[in-house]
Image: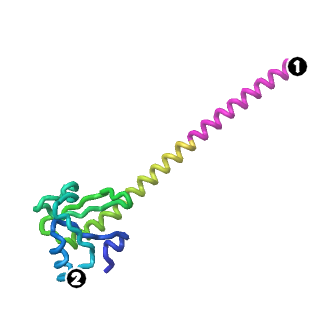
């Protein structure tokens, strides 16, 4: 089965209050290949609302390159890290689809506004041509008369 992170062209990393030495030991023992980042002082995790020692497992979806938090997912009672990643992976395409639909709707509204503006400009031009035609007919009647 393809990794959800690969399917989303995403990078998965673990960030916790675990000290770097313990993380290195865990990575060797478990054969983990994902980046294990330590924020022992909870400076970054605290700013994200996940800094408490008892904070539940949280997955964040970050926008690149601005590193903007686009979504936050907290593990449910008893949910494993792998299940949380699967849940995030299932939610991201839905969010992408909603964003694409919003962009499409905005584009359609923009096209409709442009068309309305063009129609109004053509209506004014037509009125000007009719006025010029009326003036020309009146001038021709004066000359003929």
Locate the N terminus by quadrant.
bottom left
Query: Closest to the observer: 32 or 19?
Result: 19
- Label 2 element class: loop
Is 135 placed above or below 94 here?
A: above
**Magenta residues?**
116-145
Residue 55: image quadrant is bottom left
Q: CA distance from mark 1 to mark 2?
A: 100 Å
Tell me, yes or no, if residue 75 can be seen here. no
Q: Would you say residue 138 sits in the magenta stretch? A: yes
Q: Residue furthest right?
A: 144
x then y, percent, for residue 86: 26, 70
Label ID, residue 31: 2
Tell me, yes or no, if residue 126 can be seen here. yes
x then y, percent, for residue 26: 17, 78
- Label 1 element class: helix
Residue drawn at (49%, 50%), measured in percent from left and top? 107
Residue 143: image quadrant is top right
Residue drawn at (27%, 70%), measured in percent from left and top? 13
Residue drawn at (21%, 71%), measured in percent from left and top? 83
Residue 130: image quadrant is top right
Query: Closest to the observer: 54 or 92?
Result: 54
x then y, percent, for residue 138: 80, 21
Query: Closest to the observer: 23 or 126?
Result: 23
Q: Nearer the viewer, mark 1 or mark 2?
A: 2
Query: Closest to the observer: 75 or 119?
Result: 75
Q: Residue furthest front?
A: 21
Residue to which mark 1 is pinned: 143
């Amino acid at each position: 089965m393809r990794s959800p992170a690969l399917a989303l062209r995403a990078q998965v990393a673990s960030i916790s209050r675990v000290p770097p030495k313990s993380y290195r030991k865990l990575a060797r023992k478990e054969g983990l290949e994902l980046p294990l980042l330590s924020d022992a002082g909870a400076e970054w995790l605290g700013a994200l609302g996940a800094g408490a020692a008892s904070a539940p497992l949280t997955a964040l979806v970050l926008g690149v390159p601005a590193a903007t938090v686009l979504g936050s997912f907290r593990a449910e009672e008893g949910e494993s890290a792998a299940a949380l990643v699967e849940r995030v992976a299932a939610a991201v395409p839905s969010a992408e689809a909603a964003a694409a639909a919003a962009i499409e709707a905005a584009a359609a509204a923009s096209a409709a506004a442009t068309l309305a503006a063009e129609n109004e400009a053509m209506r004014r031009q037509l009125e000007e041509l009719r006025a010029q035609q009326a003036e020309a007919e009146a001038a021709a009647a004066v000359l003929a008369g």
